Image: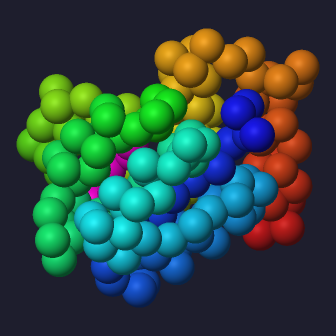
């Protein structure tokens, strides 16, 4: 569905993938995984690509900038979020300059990640010319975030 928030997780390494998958599950964001740039290329070339792509900075066959390039050639706009191993201002600035929507690093706070997802999804949906359903993305994510923090 065009307005559904879905995410492609492009991670070669298992631990950061599991951490990001768990954080997005708390936000009720469905995910699929690609382990390489080639797998990401296949997923992003589909008729209805995911709205978001979270990627490690380095992949076995490329890097985050290659993912941004792939997203620009996708059939529908895809927002790319670069995931660092730690806060890295240079990587953050480079990613934004090249066209990524945002940069995140662990630990993944639910409220912060919900904000990143909301902003990136809103931008991608606007570029797709799709209104975010009748219920804005922020309203769909906030109850999930509040509930997950109440159980922490």
Q: Is residue 66 left or right of residue 144?
A: left
Residue at 37% across / 69% down in the picture?
39
Q: Position of residue 4 (x, y in %)?
A: 74, 39
One can see residue 2 in this view: yes
14 relative to 93, above or below: below
Determine the residue positioned at 35% across, 40% down: 71
What x and y, as percent, mark residue 108? 51, 59
Identify which residue is drawn at 63% across, 72% down.
22
Residue 11 in sight from this viewpoint: no
Foreground pick, 148 / 34: 34
Q: Work out which quarter of the rendered image holds the C terminus and state it.
A: bottom right
The answer to which quarter of the image holds residue 34 is bottom left
The stretch drawn in magenta includes residue 84: yes
Q: Is residue 115 left or right of residue 106?
A: right
The residue lying furthest to the bottom in this view is 14
Q: Which residue occupies the foreground of this view, 142 or 121?
A: 121
Q: Position of residue 29 (x, y in %)?
A: 70, 54
The vertical placement of 92 against 87, above or below, is above
Extent of the magenta region: 80-86
Q: Give whichever of 54, 48 is nearer the camera.
A: 48
Q: Nearer the viewer, residue 135 or 148?
A: 135
**On the image, which quarter does residue 84 sit in?**
bottom left
Magenta segment includes 35:
no
Which of the image's four quarters has the N terminus? Answer: top right
**Colouring used for the render:** rainbow
């Amino acid at each position: 569905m065009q307005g559904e928030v879905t995410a492609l997780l492009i991670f070669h390494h298992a631990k950061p993938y599991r951490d990001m998958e768990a954080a997005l599950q708390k936000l009720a964001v469905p995910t699929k995984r690609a382990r390489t740039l080639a797998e990401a290329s296949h997923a992003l070339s589909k008729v209805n690509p995911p709205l978001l792509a979270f990627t490690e900075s380095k992949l076995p066959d490329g890097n985050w900038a290659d993912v941004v390039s792939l997203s620009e050639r996708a059939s529908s706009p895809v927002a790319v979020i670069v995931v660092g191993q730690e806060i890295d201002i240079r990587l953050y600035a480079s990613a934004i300059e090249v066209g990524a929507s945002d940069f995140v690093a662990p630990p993944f706070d639910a409220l912060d990640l919900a904000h990143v997802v909301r902003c990136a999804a809103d931008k991608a949906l606007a570029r797709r010319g799709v209104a975010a359903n009748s219920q804005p993305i922020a309203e769909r994510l906030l109850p999930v975030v509040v509930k997950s923090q109440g159980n922490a």
